Image: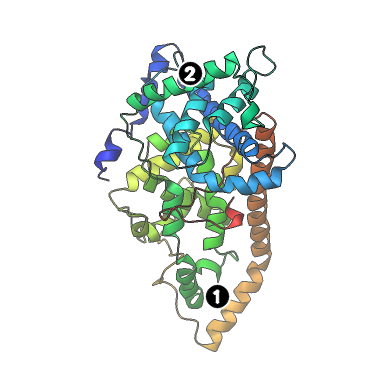
């Protein structure tokens, strides 16, 4: 895949992760990646706290906070990517998590044109990193005419964020243009239900043309896509692969999770829509082909690797089966488009056969439907639990919707 000029300096080979400034200062690879993950989770926590302070909410008003947070999905994608980019150029030894978390949130809020005030961000940095410390009192202004004096700690933290912002901008080469995988995924699966409907009619109304009983629909992709992408952003994948590659790999992961099949089968099915992701990967009966296949396979391999390292939650890979030793069974069959191996069930005999097969598969179909519901419920419960933890001082696990802009689609409520 040919990288655009804006992507060339920010897509690194995986070997570069072992030659960062933090590594030169004594951090192991795993230690640095965990610190980056912690920084991103801290940013999510700070964002929720800032949303609450901005809107006069308390920690118990989680539903209202969650609703407001939906407008900041794009901001959190930007934050995560900036953290990974920054630490490819600067060391954790010189720029610790507290100052970088506040700085990146402040920078990203200006990029995303979000209504976050620096004073509120600093207040919540003090709550999080300097609780009950003398001199680090948050600057609470209830009456503009009788505003209290700014504490020394608040002034120090504010200056630190402002000064670090200039250093961060230089380290990032003033390049703050970040493409979002969520937008690409959302747009690329539009029309998926119509493609599936054509195949259903050809295959005797079997879901996605293979009789699994559960369709990989637009609704399911959007419901599961954001939680997976949110987890992926905690790992260094945003600086190892392009946004299109990550979005496509997420689509393959969703197919594999819903159908509980190996990733090689999920990849084969996803390849039918490769052109919609603007990638050179295509379906064939011998398996997916195309110039971008190697990069996509590497992305899926990294996903598994970072799940094992616990940088990505195990919950998002729990229903994916391991690839068989012999690889993808051939000839591969289409999930979403016309399948040359599937005959039109027009005769009475074919119709009866389809019904008999449907009865045989009803048990497994019910089990799969239950598994899909569990997958969605796990994602929703995991996000809500993490949000609650973030509000009271932990780290936010998943993220809300982007600021409304023409280029950024608004997902359904189930996606958050």
Q: Give the residue at x 45% y 78%.
A: 343
Circles 2 and 1: CB distance less than 8 Å? no
Task: Tell me if mark 1 has few (under 14), some (14-19) or many (20+) residues whose alpha carbon lies within 10 angstroms of its own.
Answer: many
Decide: is 146 above or below 181. Answer: above
Q: Of helix, strand and loop, which one carries label 2?
A: helix
x and y percentages locating residue 397 in the rendered image:
60, 37
Mark 2 / mark 1, whichever is N-terminal: 2
Coloration of the structure image: rainbow
Closer to the eye: label 2 or 1 = 2
Is 56 left or right of 234, judged from the image as shown?
right
x and y percentages locating residue 97 in the rendered image:
52, 21
Q: Of helix, strand and loop, which one carries label 1?
A: loop
Residue 88: which quarter of the image?
Answer: top left
Looking at this view, is 346 or 191 the one in front?
191
**On the image, numbered disc 1 is attached to which residue?**
205
Q: How far apart are marks 2 and 1 (CA)?
A: 62 Å
Decide: is 228 above or below 283. Answer: above
Task: Tell me if mark 2 has few (under 14), some (14-19) or many (20+) residues whose alpha carbon lies within 10 angstroms of its own.
Answer: some
**On the image, numbered disc 2 is attached to which residue?**
160
Q: Can residue 269 be seen in this view?
A: no
Decide: is 171 above or below 57. Answer: above
């Amino acid at each position: 895949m040919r990288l655009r000029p804006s992507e060339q300096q920010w897509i690194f080979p995986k070997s570069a992760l072992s030659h960062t400034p933090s590594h030169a200062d004594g951090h192991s690879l795993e230690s640095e990646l965990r610190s980056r993950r912690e920084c991103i989770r801290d940013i999510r926590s700070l964002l929720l706290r800032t949303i609450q302070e901005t809107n006069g909410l308390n920690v118990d008003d989680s539903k209202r906070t969650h609703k407001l947070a939906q407008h900041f999905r794009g901001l959190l994608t930007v934050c995560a990517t900036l953290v990974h980019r920054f630490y490819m150029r600067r060391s954790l030894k010189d720029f610790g998590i507290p100052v970088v978390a506040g700085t990146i949130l402040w920078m990203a809020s200006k990029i995303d044109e979000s209504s976050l005030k620096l004073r509120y961000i600093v207040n919540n940095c003090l709550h999080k990193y300097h609780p009950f410390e003398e001199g680090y009192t948050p600057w609470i202004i209830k009456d503009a005419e009788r505003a209290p004096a700014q504490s020394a700690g608040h002034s120090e933290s504010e200056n630190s964020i402002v000064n670090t912002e200039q250093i961060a901008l230089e380290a990032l080469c003033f390049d703050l243009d970040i493409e979002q995988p969520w937008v690409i995924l959302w747009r690329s699966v539009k029309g998926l239900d119509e493609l599936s409907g054509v195949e259903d009619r050809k295959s005797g109304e079997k879901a996605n043309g293979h009789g699994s009983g559960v369709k990989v629909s637009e609704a399911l992709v959007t419901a599961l896509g954001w939680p997976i992408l949110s987890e992926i952003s905690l790992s260094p994948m945003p600086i190892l692969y392009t946004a299109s590659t990550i979005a496509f790999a997420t689509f393959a992961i969703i197919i594999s999770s819903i159908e509980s099949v190996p990733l090689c089968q999920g990849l084969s099915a996803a390849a039918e829509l490769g052109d919609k992701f603007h990638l050179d990967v295509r379906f064939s009966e011998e398996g997916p082909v195309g110039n971008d296949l190697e990069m996509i396979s590497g992305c899926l391999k990294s996903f598994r690797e970072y799940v094992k390292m616990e940088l990505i939650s195990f919950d998002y890979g729990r229903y994916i089966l391991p690839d068989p030793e012999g690889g993808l069974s051939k000839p591969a069959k289409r999930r979403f488009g016309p399948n040359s191996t599937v005959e039109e069930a027009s005769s009475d005999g074919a119709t009866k056969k389809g019904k008999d097969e449907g009865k045989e598969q009803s048990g497994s179909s019910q089990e799969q439907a239950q598994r899909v519901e569990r997958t969605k419920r796990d994602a929703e419960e995991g996000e809500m639990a993490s949000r609650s933890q973030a509000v009271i001082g932990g780290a936010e696990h998943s993220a809300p919707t982007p600021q409304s802009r023409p280029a950024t689609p608004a997902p359904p409520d189930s996606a958050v």
